Amino acid sequence: MAAIEPVQFAASILSADFCRLGEQVEEALKAGIRLIHVDVMDGLFVPNLSMGPNIVKALQPLKNKYGAQIHAHLMIIDPDRYITNFVQAGADGIIVHIEACPHLLQTIRNIRSLGARTGVALNPATPLIMLEEILAEVDFTLIMSVEPGFGGQEFIQTSLDKIARLHKLLFHHHLEHVKIAVDGGIHLPIAASIVKAGAHTLVVGSEIFNSRASVSKNFQALCTEFINSR
Ligand code: DX5
Ligand code: ZN
């Protein structure tokens, strides 16, 4: 088990009420969230369609008001086609999938040349070894703990071991500055175990945006659960 470091929560707006998107994002920002996660889906890489750069652009005033950041998680084939669009729309970080990038090093360098933070995501079935050659080039990795495409799925338990192994791999390569983000199925009971396994950032959708309680109450519950488990 890795030592527990301060955790960062990213709010995945896929589960937000799109009729009240600005209001809900502002509630999350007011509650203390400083990273907004925008899931971009093309109906090909994943069996769902979602948002484009226009959403990132629309959120800029809120992002600037609260000093937050936006990361675009590109679940699309050939993501190089759209990286510039997302950075120009105001994305501070771009996450591409290793499974969608035949020339990953070039893609990563393209993102960096545009001034954005670089993240590489791995699907649940993709082995960590696929990352090894490019780890030194990225700012963070994103371990998918569900099959990408939909919010509200169940956390895949074997992801905990994968996160712990990635943590060791980074240590082994003296790359502790490369952060580990985890995305999918993160709910109250499992959140602390994910951080204990070595994650720095938890991407949370349906646990924050749901009809059970307000965004701020849900986020507060997440923080409380996390603090109590330490
Ligand atoms: C899944 C997305 C996730 C998802 C997280 O493809 O990448 O960001 O929206 O939502 P929850 O927390 O509901 O699994
Ligand atoms: Zn995501």
Image (cartoon, rainbow, N blue to C red):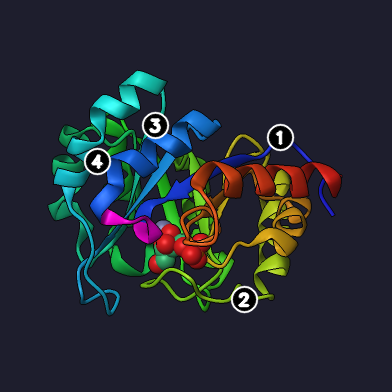
Local secondary structure at mark 3: strand
Q: Quadrant of residue 165?
A: bottom right
**CA gap, disc 1 to disc 4?**
30 Å
Residue 156's disc number: 2
User: Which of the two residues, 93 or 222, is positioned nearer the viewer here?
Assistant: 222
Q: Are marks 2 and 3 in contact (CB under 8 Å)?
A: no
Disc 3 marks a residue whose amino acid type is Gln
Q: Are marks 3 and 4 in contact (CB under 8 Å)?
A: no
Comes first in the chain, label 2 or label 4: 4
Q: Which residue is mark 3?
A: 69
- Quadrant showing the C terminus: top right
For image coordinates 24% across by 53% down, the residue present is 19
Disc 2 marks a residue whose amino acid type is Ile
User: Can residue 189 be seen?
Assistant: yes
Measured along the vertical axis of the image, is residue 124 above or below residue 22?
A: below
Comes first in the chain, label 2 or label 3: 3
Disc 4 marks a residue whose amino acid type is Asn
User: Which of the two residues, 110 or 133, is positioned nearer the viewer here?
Assistant: 110
Within 10 angstroms of label 1, few (less than 14), some, or many (20 or more) residues? few
- Residue 16: x and y, percent? 37, 55
User: Can residue 3 be seen?
Assistant: no
Q: Are marks 1 and 2 in contact (CB under 8 Å)?
A: no
**Mark 1 lies within 8 Å of ligand 1 (Cβ measured):** no
Disc 1 marks a residue whose amino acid type is Pro
Measured along the vertical axis of the image, is residue 204 above or below residue 156?
A: above
Measured along the vertical axis of the image, is residue 50 above or below residue 82?
A: below
Q: Which residue is mark 1?
A: 6
Local secondary structure at mark 2: loop
For image coordinates 54% across by 33% down, the residue present is 31
Residue 151's disc number: none
Give the number of callouts. Answer: 4
- Residue 69: x and y, percent? 39, 31
